[in-house]
Image: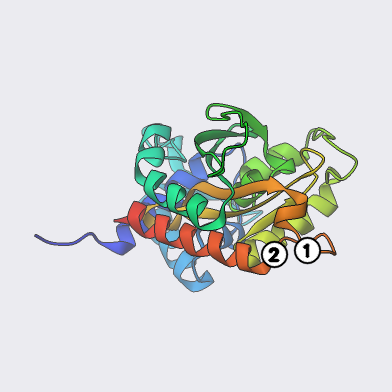
Amino acid sequence: MAGTIQSIERAAAVLRLLSSGPQPLTLLEVSAALGLAKGTTHGILRTLVDVGFVAQDVSTGRYDVGNRLAAISSAHLDANTVRSMTINWADTLASRTGESVRVGVLRGLCVEVVHHVFRPDDSEQSMSTGELLPSHATALGKALLAFHPATQARLMSGHPELCTHRTVTHPKELKQHLDSVRRAGTATEVEEHLLGRAAVASPVRGRGGLVVAAVEVVGAVERLCDGEGRVHSTLVAQVLTVAHTMSRDLAA
Protein backbone atom coordinates (compact mmCIF):
# COMPACT_ATOMS: atom_id res chain seq x y z
CA MET A 1 0.00 0.00 0.00
CA ALA A 2 1.42 3.36 -1.02
CA GLY A 3 2.29 5.91 1.65
CA THR A 4 1.00 9.45 1.95
CA ILE A 5 2.41 12.30 -0.13
CA GLN A 6 4.06 14.87 2.13
CA SER A 7 3.68 17.80 -0.27
CA ILE A 8 -0.10 17.30 -0.42
CA GLU A 9 -0.33 17.07 3.37
CA ARG A 10 1.59 20.34 3.64
CA ALA A 11 -0.62 22.03 1.07
CA ALA A 12 -3.70 20.93 3.03
CA ALA A 13 -2.16 22.33 6.22
CA VAL A 14 -1.56 25.67 4.49
CA LEU A 15 -5.21 25.81 3.38
CA ARG A 16 -6.48 24.99 6.87
CA LEU A 17 -4.23 27.65 8.36
CA LEU A 18 -5.34 30.35 5.91
CA SER A 19 -9.02 29.47 6.36
CA SER A 20 -8.83 29.55 10.17
CA GLY A 21 -8.41 33.29 10.63
CA PRO A 22 -10.09 36.57 9.76
CA GLN A 23 -7.17 38.09 7.88
CA PRO A 24 -4.61 37.10 5.22
CA LEU A 25 -1.12 35.98 6.27
CA THR A 26 2.38 36.75 5.07
CA LEU A 27 4.80 34.18 3.73
CA LEU A 28 6.83 34.36 6.95
CA GLU A 29 3.73 33.90 9.12
CA VAL A 30 2.70 30.78 7.21
CA SER A 31 6.24 29.44 7.29
CA ALA A 32 6.59 29.97 11.04
CA ALA A 33 3.16 28.57 11.89
CA LEU A 34 3.83 25.31 10.03
CA GLY A 35 7.50 25.00 10.90
CA LEU A 36 8.50 24.87 7.23
CA ALA A 37 11.44 26.46 5.43
CA LYS A 38 10.63 29.75 3.70
CA GLY A 39 11.50 28.35 0.27
CA THR A 40 9.31 25.29 0.76
CA THR A 41 6.41 27.40 1.96
CA HIS A 42 6.75 29.80 -0.97
CA GLY A 43 6.68 26.93 -3.43
CA ILE A 44 3.50 25.51 -1.90
CA LEU A 45 1.81 28.91 -1.86
CA ARG A 46 2.76 29.70 -5.46
CA THR A 47 1.36 26.35 -6.59
CA LEU A 48 -1.89 26.91 -4.67
CA VAL A 49 -2.15 30.40 -6.18
CA ASP A 50 -1.64 28.96 -9.67
CA VAL A 51 -4.49 26.46 -9.23
CA GLY A 52 -6.79 29.04 -7.64
CA PHE A 53 -6.96 27.61 -4.13
CA VAL A 54 -5.06 30.59 -2.66
CA ALA A 55 -5.15 34.26 -3.57
CA GLN A 56 -2.34 36.77 -3.03
CA ASP A 57 -2.97 40.46 -2.49
CA VAL A 58 -0.75 42.29 -4.98
CA SER A 59 -0.40 45.39 -2.77
CA THR A 60 0.45 43.64 0.54
CA GLY A 61 1.83 40.30 -0.64
CA ARG A 62 -0.40 38.52 1.89
CA TYR A 63 -2.10 35.20 1.17
CA ASP A 64 -5.68 34.12 1.73
CA VAL A 65 -7.90 31.22 0.70
CA GLY A 66 -9.13 31.64 -2.88
CA ASN A 67 -12.92 31.90 -3.09
CA ARG A 68 -12.88 30.97 0.59
CA LEU A 69 -13.22 27.26 -0.22
CA ALA A 70 -15.85 26.75 2.43
CA ALA A 71 -15.21 23.04 2.52
CA ILE A 72 -11.72 23.64 3.88
CA SER A 73 -12.41 25.56 7.06
CA SER A 74 -11.32 23.50 10.04
CA ALA A 75 -8.00 24.39 11.63
CA HIS A 76 -8.01 21.58 14.17
CA LEU A 77 -8.83 17.92 14.57
CA ASP A 78 -11.95 16.83 16.41
CA ALA A 79 -11.33 17.08 20.18
CA ASN A 80 -12.19 13.41 20.71
CA THR A 81 -9.69 12.41 18.04
CA VAL A 82 -6.94 14.47 19.67
CA ARG A 83 -7.75 12.97 23.07
CA SER A 84 -7.82 9.37 21.86
CA MET A 85 -4.51 9.74 20.01
CA THR A 86 -2.63 11.46 22.85
CA ILE A 87 -4.09 9.85 25.97
CA ASN A 88 -1.42 7.17 26.41
CA TRP A 89 1.49 9.61 26.12
CA ALA A 90 -0.20 12.10 28.47
CA ASP A 91 -0.58 9.33 31.06
CA THR A 92 3.09 8.41 30.61
CA LEU A 93 4.20 12.03 31.04
CA ALA A 94 2.23 12.35 34.28
CA SER A 95 3.78 9.15 35.59
CA ARG A 96 7.32 10.25 34.73
CA THR A 97 7.04 13.78 36.10
CA GLY A 98 4.77 13.13 39.05
CA GLU A 99 2.67 16.13 37.97
CA SER A 100 -0.68 16.87 36.36
CA VAL A 101 -0.80 16.80 32.55
CA ARG A 102 -3.33 18.49 30.26
CA VAL A 103 -3.92 18.39 26.50
CA GLY A 104 -5.76 21.30 24.89
CA VAL A 105 -6.98 22.71 21.57
CA LEU A 106 -7.88 26.26 20.52
CA ARG A 107 -11.52 27.29 20.79
CA GLY A 108 -11.78 30.86 19.61
CA LEU A 109 -9.49 32.91 21.83
CA CYS A 110 -9.51 30.27 24.57
CA VAL A 111 -8.05 26.81 25.06
CA GLU A 112 -10.33 23.86 25.68
CA VAL A 113 -8.85 21.14 27.89
CA VAL A 114 -9.68 17.88 26.09
CA HIS A 115 -7.74 15.56 28.39
CA HIS A 116 -6.52 15.89 31.98
CA VAL A 117 -4.38 13.40 33.86
CA PHE A 118 -4.26 13.86 37.63
CA ARG A 119 -0.99 14.14 39.50
CA PRO A 120 -0.22 10.51 40.49
CA ASP A 121 -0.53 10.89 44.27
CA ASP A 122 -3.34 10.82 46.81
CA SER A 123 -3.92 14.58 46.94
CA GLU A 124 -7.36 16.09 46.29
CA GLN A 125 -7.61 17.37 42.72
CA SER A 126 -10.29 18.78 40.42
CA MET A 127 -10.89 17.56 36.87
CA SER A 128 -10.48 20.34 34.27
CA THR A 129 -11.49 18.44 31.12
CA GLY A 130 -13.91 20.62 29.17
CA GLU A 131 -12.77 23.86 30.81
CA LEU A 132 -11.98 26.92 28.69
CA LEU A 133 -8.74 28.64 29.73
CA PRO A 134 -7.37 32.05 28.65
CA SER A 135 -4.91 31.32 25.86
CA HIS A 136 -2.61 34.28 26.59
CA ALA A 137 -2.19 33.43 30.29
CA THR A 138 -1.49 29.70 30.12
CA ALA A 139 1.45 27.70 28.80
CA LEU A 140 -1.03 25.47 26.99
CA GLY A 141 -2.56 28.45 25.22
CA LYS A 142 0.70 30.19 24.38
CA ALA A 143 2.05 27.00 22.78
CA LEU A 144 -0.96 27.17 20.45
CA LEU A 145 -1.15 30.94 19.90
CA ALA A 146 2.48 31.10 18.80
CA PHE A 147 1.64 29.00 15.74
CA HIS A 148 -1.75 30.54 14.88
CA PRO A 149 -1.01 34.12 13.77
CA ALA A 150 -4.62 34.94 12.85
CA THR A 151 -5.92 34.02 16.31
CA GLN A 152 -2.98 35.85 17.84
CA ALA A 153 -3.90 39.00 15.91
CA ARG A 154 -7.54 38.78 17.02
CA LEU A 155 -6.49 38.47 20.65
CA MET A 156 -4.14 41.43 20.50
CA SER A 157 -6.72 43.63 18.82
CA GLY A 158 -8.90 43.29 21.91
CA HIS A 159 -8.24 43.52 25.63
CA PRO A 160 -6.69 40.32 27.01
CA GLU A 161 -7.82 39.56 30.56
CA LEU A 162 -5.48 40.36 33.44
CA CYS A 163 -5.67 37.14 35.48
CA THR A 164 -2.87 37.99 37.96
CA HIS A 165 -0.33 40.77 38.36
CA ARG A 166 2.05 38.67 36.23
CA THR A 167 -0.23 38.16 33.23
CA VAL A 168 1.26 39.52 29.99
CA THR A 169 -1.41 41.61 28.24
CA HIS A 170 0.45 44.37 26.37
CA PRO A 171 0.34 43.49 22.63
CA LYS A 172 4.01 44.24 21.92
CA GLU A 173 5.29 42.32 24.95
CA LEU A 174 2.93 39.42 24.28
CA LYS A 175 4.04 39.21 20.64
CA GLN A 176 7.70 39.14 21.67
CA HIS A 177 6.90 36.40 24.14
CA LEU A 178 5.06 34.31 21.54
CA ASP A 179 7.89 34.79 19.04
CA SER A 180 10.23 33.27 21.65
CA VAL A 181 7.81 30.38 22.17
CA ARG A 182 7.78 29.67 18.44
CA ARG A 183 11.59 29.63 18.28
CA ALA A 184 12.00 27.43 21.36
CA GLY A 185 9.11 25.07 20.66
CA THR A 186 8.01 25.31 24.31
CA ALA A 187 6.01 27.78 26.39
CA THR A 188 6.21 28.40 30.11
CA GLU A 189 4.10 30.41 32.52
CA VAL A 190 4.69 31.13 36.17
CA GLU A 191 1.72 32.55 38.10
CA GLU A 192 0.28 34.25 35.00
CA HIS A 193 -3.02 32.37 35.23
CA LEU A 194 -3.23 31.38 38.90
CA LEU A 195 -0.99 32.43 41.77
CA GLY A 196 1.15 29.59 43.06
CA ARG A 197 0.89 27.65 39.79
CA ALA A 198 3.38 27.13 36.96
CA ALA A 199 3.34 25.16 33.72
CA VAL A 200 5.35 24.22 30.65
CA ALA A 201 3.78 23.23 27.32
CA SER A 202 4.74 22.26 23.79
CA PRO A 203 2.72 22.23 20.54
CA VAL A 204 1.50 19.03 18.91
CA ARG A 205 1.44 18.94 15.12
CA GLY A 206 -0.83 16.99 12.80
CA ARG A 207 -0.37 16.10 9.15
CA GLY A 208 1.41 18.74 7.12
CA GLY A 209 2.91 20.35 10.20
CA LEU A 210 -0.19 22.28 11.36
CA VAL A 211 -0.27 22.75 15.14
CA VAL A 212 -3.56 21.12 16.25
CA ALA A 213 -3.08 20.76 20.01
CA ALA A 214 -0.67 21.31 22.88
CA VAL A 215 0.39 19.29 25.91
CA GLU A 216 1.46 20.73 29.25
CA VAL A 217 2.67 19.79 32.70
CA VAL A 218 1.12 22.01 35.37
CA GLY A 219 1.64 22.18 39.12
CA ALA A 220 2.82 24.14 42.11
CA VAL A 221 5.58 26.71 41.57
CA GLU A 222 7.76 25.23 44.29
CA ARG A 223 7.81 21.85 42.54
CA LEU A 224 8.09 22.97 38.91
CA CYS A 225 10.49 25.90 39.27
CA ASP A 226 14.01 26.50 40.56
CA GLY A 227 15.04 29.14 43.10
CA GLU A 228 14.95 31.86 40.45
CA GLY A 229 11.40 31.11 39.37
CA ARG A 230 12.27 29.30 36.13
CA VAL A 231 10.70 26.00 35.15
CA HIS A 232 13.25 23.18 35.54
CA SER A 233 15.03 22.44 32.25
CA THR A 234 14.58 18.67 32.71
CA LEU A 235 10.82 19.17 32.84
CA VAL A 236 10.89 21.32 29.70
CA ALA A 237 12.83 18.59 27.90
CA GLN A 238 10.37 15.89 28.97
CA VAL A 239 7.38 17.85 27.69
CA LEU A 240 9.12 18.62 24.40
CA THR A 241 9.97 14.95 23.86
CA VAL A 242 6.42 13.78 24.50
CA ALA A 243 4.99 16.49 22.22
CA HIS A 244 7.24 15.31 19.41
CA THR A 245 6.09 11.74 19.96
CA MET A 246 2.44 12.79 19.96
CA SER A 247 3.05 14.71 16.72
CA ARG A 248 4.57 11.65 15.12
CA ASP A 249 1.54 9.54 16.06
CA LEU A 250 -0.96 12.16 14.84
CA ALA A 251 0.89 12.58 11.55
CA ALA A 252 0.79 8.83 11.04
- Along the line of sight, the residue nearer the viewer: 125 or 33: 125
Please give the name of the residue rendered at 50% of the width and 71% of the height, measured from the top-left corner.
37
Q: Which kind of residue does numbered mark 1 sit on?
A: Asp
Helix, strand or loop for disc 2? loop
Residue 41 vs residue 11: left or right? right
**Relative to 14, residue 179 above or below:** below
Quadrant (top left/top right/bottom left/bottom right) for the N terminus:
bottom left
Is there any visible trace of residue 148 in the rendered image?
no
Please give the name of the residue rendered at 57% of the width and 52% of the height, measured from the top-left corner.
98
Is there any visible trace of residue 28 in the rendered image?
yes
- Along the line of sight, the residue nearer the viewer: 82 or 170: 82
Query: Where residue 226 sits in the image (x, y, percent)?
Result: 78, 63
- Along the line of sight, the residue nearer the viewer: 207 or 245: 245
Q: Which residue is denoted by mark 2 in the rendering?
A: 232
Quadrant (top left/top right/bottom left/bottom right) for the C terminus:
bottom left
- Give neighbour class at mark 2: few <14, some 14-19, many 20+ (Cα, 10 Å): some
Query: Where residue 10 sits in the image (x, y, percent)?
Result: 38, 58
**Relative to 224, residue 87 above or below:** above
- Give neighbour class at mark 1: few <14, some 14-19, many 20+ (Cα, 10 Å): few
Helix, strand or loop for disc 1? loop
Q: Which of the colour schemes (rainbow, by chain, secondary structure, one colour) is used?
A: rainbow
- Calculate the distance from the C-alpha at mark 1 to the C-alpha at mark 2: 6 Å
Evaluate if marks 1 and 2 touch, with contact meaning CB atoms under 8 Å apart.
yes
Q: Which residue is denoted by mark 1 in the rendering?
A: 226
Query: Where residue 191 sits in the image (x, y, percent)?
Result: 80, 45
